[in-house]
Amino acid sequence: MPLHIVRADITTLSVDAIVNAANESLLGGGGVDGAIHRAAGPELLVECRTLHGCKTGEAKITSGYLLPAKHVIHTVGPIWSGGNDGEENLLRACYRNSLNLAVENGCESVAFPLISSGVYGYPKAAALNVAVSEISGFLFSHDDLLVYIVVFDKRGFEIGQTLQNDVQAYIDQNYVDEHEMLYARSQLLFCAPMPSAPPPMAAQPCMSADTFMDEELVAFNDLDELDDLDDFVLDEGFSEMLLRKIDERGMTDPECYKKANVDRKLFSKIKSNKDYKPSKVTAIAFAIALELSIDETDELLMKAGYALSHSNMFDVIIEYFIKNEKYDIFEINDTLFKYDQVLLG
Ligand code: APR
């Protein structure tokens, strides 16, 4: 996948370039600027002095010195003053100019902090949305570049309060944590034998705990009814269903896999191998990109060998968004991040 959102200290990343959220003097400061200068050593400042500053929205490159990264790209984000002073365009320019500079210098991997979202006061969720949308747009025509957005701290990561209340209410109603699952399982395995069950079955569980937890009991096919395997017609696989849904939605393949933030190579693998089984997160990312209903999502996941489970917080959050037809991947990631879950894309 060309774009990853990770939580780390950017000064520790071994990438071709890390981006510094600097100020116009380029002579260091606090926050990530201070951390980068401390980790790079004094030679970074010596080189920065030769650059004679940097305008807001622009970017300049230096060596990385003692950092694991080869280069540092210094860019200056806008100071937030309410959002009506061109801040978003300047912030977008920071990402675009930094990415262009990275490509011009042969970088194949770049890591960004959330520019302007610290001292400069840009709201973090909005800053993340700008970063993801600007970088994703750039990657449409540079999908060999690997980009990381490094989120340093969860603190202050706001998601809409209404959304937060809705999601929390949904989790409270549906999330069955492991403890409850184990308790339910322990109760089920020693339930009274079914009256019709012959003696050997008496000690068997009357039904599996997992079945008990499913909202609908799955009607098991009685395979004895089938004369032979030829009668057992195989459904379309994950790949076939994915391609069918892309056609039904009137999307092109690139539109779909880029909206799902899945890289071209992985998509080609899935497309060329009808038995290919992607990861659960990738399968869900496609469901979101295709804006599938919960039933279609369940069907697509099942073809990859997965199911949404109420004992999995990630699944419950995904189910909330799909059931409420909220397919904004940034909003979903904000929420997943808030609950310390793996992010989509
Ligand atoms: N790794 C990754 N991200 C970090 C790190 C780190 N080591 N340290 C801080 N951050 C994050 C912050 O949590 C914030 O989300 O970087 C983001 C940007 O915050 P700032 O560093 O405060 O940068 P910014 O908001 O753009 O303000 C720039 O602050 O440090 C001074 O000299 C800098 O004057 C300039 C101003």
Image: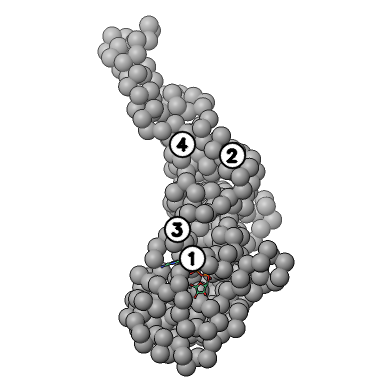
Q: Is mark 3 within 8 Å of ligand 1?
A: yes
Q: Residue furthest right?
A: 84
Q: Position of residue 215 (x, y in %)?
A: 51, 27
- Residue 122, horizontal then vertical, whole percent: 59, 64
Amino acid beneath label 4: Ser
Disc sitting over residue 153 in the figure: 3
Identify which residue, 124 or 30, lies in the foreground.
Answer: 30
- Whether 10 is drawn above or below 161: the answer is below
What is the spatial separation of the Cα atoms under label 2 and label 4, in whole angstroms?
21 Å
Image colouring: one colour
Real-space Cα separation, disc 2 to disc 3, in angstroms: 22 Å
At x 58% / y 64%, what residue is drawn?
121
Question: Alpha-carbon distance for marks 2 and 1?
Answer: 27 Å
The tag on residue 309 is 4
Q: Earlier in the sequence, mark 4 or mark 3?
A: 3
Report if residue 253 is visible in the image: no
Query: Which is nearer the N-term, disc 1 or disc 4?
Result: 1
Secondary structure beneath dot 4 equals loop
The amino acid type of the residue labelled 3 equals: Asp
Alpha carbons under labels 3 and 1: distance apart: 12 Å
Q: Please say if the residues under marks 3 and 1 sit with CB atoms less than 8 Å apart.
A: no
